[in-house]
Amino acid sequence: MFAGCRRSPILLLAACLAASACTSHDNHASNQSRLDSVAASSSSSGDTANPFRSTGHQYGPPNGKIRVANLLELHGQPSGPVDLYDVPHPDSSVTPIIANLSYGQISAYVSPRRGSTGGRSNLYLFQAHQKTGTDPFGANIDHSGFDSTDQLTIALAPTSMGSGNAGIGGVYIEEGGKRLNSMVADKETAAQAGGALLIMSAANSMIDTLPQQYLVVDGTCPSPIFAGSMQLFPVAPGSHTLGLVISPHGRTLQTCAGHSPVSTVQVNVAAGQRYVVWMYGLPTDGFKILAAPIERP
């Protein structure tokens, strides 16, 4: 599951007033003032202990521009729909910031809110329509949280096919901000060269016994330009058919000629536009390809 620290529940103070009869108006006002003071102190203490406190909706400003692709498989099968919140312990008054995201879908961009005391934002993963997480759900999806300049796509991805230790991982494509290091950004700019660019990654990359996977563009297998773990494919503006060709594990293809794609998707790209392309799936339910345009940071 996603590693991360959980914040302690909010501790509420109970104010106990002496059980004495107050007959004067002044005494009543004094007691009420002390009660209000204790309640205010309790609220302030709770916000400090848990800046993402959902009760009272004490949130900071939106932080970052994040979208999520549900490409998660657990125990060799699609995970089912998920909800994502920007608070770790959502109560009945809180709605998901990304709701009912089905397997094979990619969300719109969202901007999670920071806690009321500042810092970074984050997203917390739950099964759809659930507000409590049973392992491996309920954790934050990023170890460090999101900065205001971050723009990225995160694929929820499998980490194991074992029957007892299947987990949830995250595969990232950085699109802007401090996370997009200069080496990768420079390679993307050079590869794009004013045309369109496909940025591809394998969401199932943490499973090391899978078949070889290749991107087919309009019936041919172009050679990728590698930028870290990403594969870059410059393409001309216009409509293209993207396909996924596989080969048995450990058997490298010299050419894709004669190999039929197991999954295809149609894209229509403009000059200067970037697309994220994900390979995902497992042998138990088939390999697939997903593509979506990247918004300009």
Image (cartoon, grey):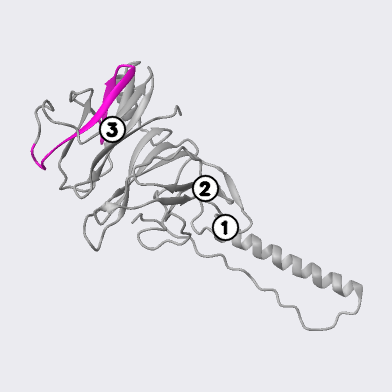
| In the displayed structure image, the side of residue 147 where residue 288 appears, left or right | left
Amino acid on which the number 1 mark rests in the picture: Arg
Amino acid on which the number 3 mark rests in the picture: Met
Q: Nearer the viewer, mark 1 or mark 3?
A: 3
Tag 3 or tag 1, which sits nearer the N-term?
Answer: 1
* Mark count: 3
Looking at the image, do the residues carrying marks 3 and 2 touch, with CB atoms under 8 Å apart? no
x and y percent of residue 166 in the render? 27, 58
Q: Report which residue position mark 3 lands on.
A: 200
Q: Residue at x 50, y 38 (%)?
A: 148
Q: Report which residue position mark 1 lands on.
A: 53
User: In the drawing, what numbered circle is on residue 119?
Assistant: 2
Quadrant of residue 61 in the image?
top right
Q: Marks 3 and 2, Cα distance to the nearest angstrom?
A: 31 Å
Q: Marks 1 and 2, Cα distance to the nearest angstrom?
A: 14 Å
Magenta-drawn stretch contains 231: yes
Q: Residues within 10 Å of mark 3 (few under 14, many from 20)?
A: many
Amino acid on which the number 2 mark rests in the picture: Gly
In the image, residue 237 sits, relative to residue 168, either above or below, namely above
Tell me the element at label 1: loop
Magenta highlight range: 227-251
| In the displayed structure image, the side of residue 194 where residue 33 appears, left or right | right
In the image, residue 280 sits, relative to residue 76, either above or below, namely above
Magenta-drawn stretch contains 38: no
